[in-house]
């Protein structure tokens, strides 16, 4: 801070901010916004991945219960109607994907059209 600025503040304590002071504040605020947007997108994508991973676990768990109770085996196809009695509610992908690969297999083949665990290493760890 310059001496003139300090003197001006002492003489006129109620004086407003200068244009350059306001510009610096606006610049810092803009920089913070620009930094926080990508972090927010990453957090959102991570939350959606985890929700989808949990949905896949529920679907596979329900398909295993269905296969046990209906005495089904490897490669048998199943539908939502078959496994809905073993789920509290129908899982919905938070990113709008559809769940596909409804055949009973060990390891499971069920996946999401948006979060395909066969192509996405971030989802690969969900397999029970
Ligand atoms: Zn998904």
Image (tube, rainbow, N blue to C red):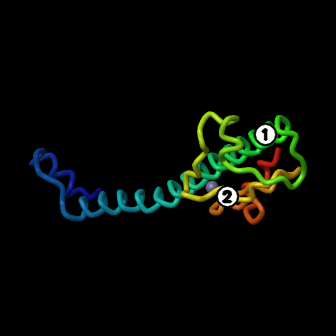
Quadrant for residue 118, please give it.
bottom right
Q: Mark 2, residues whose alpha carbon is within 10 Å: few (<14), some, or many (≥20)?
A: many
Q: Locate residue 31, reporting x and y percent.
A: 41, 61
Q: Nearer the viewer, mark 1 or mark 2?
A: 1
Query: Where in the figure is residue 51, as x and y percent of width and height?
Result: 62, 46
Rendered position, 29 above or below 12: below
Q: Is mark 1 within 8 Å of ligand 1?
A: no
Q: CA distance from mark 1 to mark 2?
A: 20 Å
Location of the N terminus by quadrant is bottom left
In the rendered image, which residue does mark 1 sit on?
66
Question: Which secondary structure, mark 2?
Answer: strand
Give the vertical position of 114 relative to 107 (above or below).
below
Which quarter of the frame holds ligand 1?
bottom right
Q: Which residue in the structure is indicated by mark 2?
A: 112
Residue 57 is situated, as x and y percent measured from the top left of the image, at 73, 43
Q: Quadrant of the C terminus?
A: top right
* Percent coordinates x, y for residue 125 in the rendering: 79, 50
Question: Could you tell me which secondary element the residue under label 1 belongs to?
Answer: helix
């Amino acid at each position: 801070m310059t001496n003139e600025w300090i003197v001006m503040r002492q003489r006129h304590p109620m004086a407003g901010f200068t244009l350059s002071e306001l510009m610096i504040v606006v610049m810092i605020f803009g920089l913070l916004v620009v930094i926080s947007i990508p972090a927010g997108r990453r957090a959102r994508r991570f939350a959606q991945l985890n929700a989808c991973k949990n949905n896949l676990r529920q679907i596979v768990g329900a398909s295993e219960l269905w296969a046990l109770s209906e005495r089904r085996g490897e490669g048998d196809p199943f539908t939502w109607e078959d496994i809905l009695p073993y789920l509290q509610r129908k899982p919905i992908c938070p990113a709008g994907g559809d769940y596909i690969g409804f055949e009973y297999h060990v390891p499971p083949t069920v996946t999401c059209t948006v979060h395909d665990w066969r192509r996405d290493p971030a989802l690969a760890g969900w397999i029970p």
